[in-house]
Amino acid sequence: MGRPTSVLHTVSPSTVTHFTPQPTPIALTVPPQVTPRFPAPPRIPPLSSPARPHPTPVPFPALPSSSLAMPPVYTARASPYVCPMQQLPTSIQRLLQEDLRPEPPTSARVNGFDSHFHLDRMIDHIASKGDYFPRTPSVVKLVGGVVNFCDPLTFKRALKLLPLLSHYHVAVGVHPKKVPDLNESSFQKLECLLACPRVAAISELGIDHTVPSADLIPPQWNFVRRLLSRGCRNQVLVLHLRPAGRDPCGHHLHGPFRDLLRQFCGEHQHIHLHNFSGDLPELQEWMAAFKNVYAGVSGLALQFNPAQVHMIRNIPSTRLLLETDSPYLPVIPGLPINTPYLLEDVGRLVSRIRDEDFREVMRVTAHNAQVLYSGFAGLTVA
Ligand SMILES: [Zn+2]
Ligand SMILES: [Zn+2]
C-alpha cells in the first residue's frame, strides 16, 4: 500500500503564493558587548539530515589499584550501626541468636519471659569476670524478655545493639543513679533511642535513695519531670523506686511519685513496677491509681520483710511478672553473674512464696509479660 498523499500537496503552489504575507523584517541584532546569560543550546540537526553513526563507546578506564576502596555495601550485619555479633561474649551470642528460636513443643520444658534484664551490663560483667554458661539443661524455654538500657555513657552501644534485638522487647531510659552522667549530648541519644518504634518502654524511671548524698535526689526528680514532659503515651513505664532504708516499703516515695505521674499520664498508662518492694497497701494504691499496673518480682525478694512477702503473695496472678534483673540479684548465692537463663530460679522462688505450682507461675507470668509489652494490656478493662 502506498503512502497517503497529504492534502497540502494537492494545492497548487501558484495558489498559495498569492496569499503569502510579506512580513516586515525585525532587526534582532544583539549588541556585541552583551554576553548571553546562558550558553547557546546545542544545535539539533534537521530531521532530513542523514542519520549519523553511533559513536564508538569508549571503554571505562580501569581504576588504579589505589582507588579501589569503594564505599562499603552495608547489610544488616555489616552496617557500622550494628554491633558485630562475633565481638560479643559467647553466652550473649547464644542468648541473641539461638535461645528464642522456635522449637517443637515438649512437655519437659515450660515457657519463660524475663521481664527485666540489662544486656550491656551483662556484657561488661562477662568482660571483667569471664564468660559464664548457666546450668544446662534448664526446664525453662525463654520465649522473650525485655532488654533495658539505662546508662547514658553506653547509649552509643545501645544504638548499635538495638538492631540485634529483634526477638526481644527493648526499654531505654536513665537509671536514677546515672542521672549525674547525663548531658545534652547523651540526652539527644536518649531522644533518638526513644523515638525508635522498637523501643517499647521507658526504662528505670524513678528515684533511688540508696545514693551516697541526699543532694543527688533533687536532680533525679528533675530528670523524671523532664522525661515525662516529653510524653510517654504508648510506652510502658518501668519504674525503679528504691526508698530510704528507714522506710523499706517506701511510703514516703510511692505516694509523691504517683502524684507526679498523675500530672503527666492518664489512668490507662502501662506501668511495670520493676522489683517492686512496697507492701500490699502500696500495691493496692498503685492499682487504684492506674489500670494497667504490673508488679515484677526478682531475687531481691530474698531480702524482703514479712510485709513485702505478704505483698508478693497477693499480687493478682494476672499482674505478676518475673525478672532476673541480670546481671544482678542471682537467687542462688555465689554465682558470678545472673543471666536470663536463670529465670527458672526466680520462678521457683515465687512459686514457693505464693505456694503455687512452678509451671503455672512460669506460664502465667510469660503470658502477662507478652500482654503488657506487646501492647495488649490496655485492651481489657477490669
Ligand atoms: Zn532498677
Ligand atoms: Zn534493672
Image (cartoon, rainbow, N blue to C red):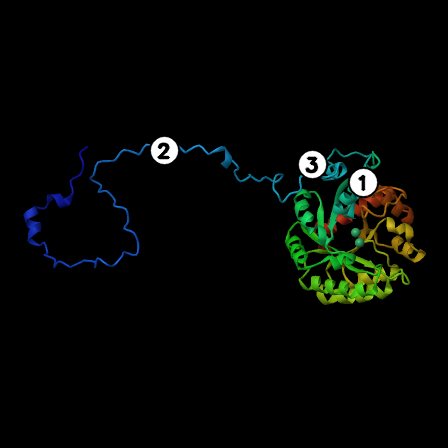
Binning the other alpha carbons within 10 Å of mark 3 as few (below 14), some (14 to 19) or many (20 upward) gives few
What residue occupies the far right of the structure in this picture? 306
Q: Position of residue 181 (x, y in %)?
A: 73, 57
Which residue is nearer to you in this view: 310 or 84? 84
**Disc 3/disc 1 C-alpha distance (Å):** 20 Å
Residue in the image at 28% along x and 49% along y: 41
Whether 144 is drawn above or below 192: the answer is above
Instruction: Measure how far apart labels 1 and 2 are at the Cα level.
Output: 63 Å
Of helix, strand and loop, which one carries label 3?
helix
Q: Is residue 112 left or right of residue 83?
A: right
Q: Which residue is mark 1?
A: 341
Quadrant where the N terminus is found in the figure: top left
Q: Residue at x 74, y 50 (%)?
A: 148
Residue type at mark 1? Tyr
The residue wearing badge 2 is 58
Residue closer to the observer: 358 or 323 = 323
Task: Compare marks 3 and 1 and give the one earlier in the sequence.
Answer: 3
- Mark earlier in primary sequence (3, 2): 2
Tell me whether circle 1 and circle 2 mark residues in contact (CB < 8 Å).
no
Disc 3 versus disc 2: distance between alpha carbons?
Answer: 45 Å
Q: Quadrant of residue 81?
A: top right
The earlier-in-sequence mark between 1 and 2 is 2
Instruction: Find residue 151 and report its horizontal and vertical position in percent.
Output: 74, 53
**Tag 1: Cα neighbours inside 10 Å, few (<14), some, or many (≥20)?**
many
Q: Say if 338 sits above or below 231 in the image.
A: above
Read off the residue under disc 3: 86
Q: Tell me residue 69's x, y (percent).
A: 53, 37
The secondary element bearing badge 2 is classed as loop
Tag 1 secondary structure: helix
Quadrant where the image shows the C terminus: bottom right
Q: Amino acid at mark 3?
A: Gln
Left or right of 228 on screen, residue 257: right
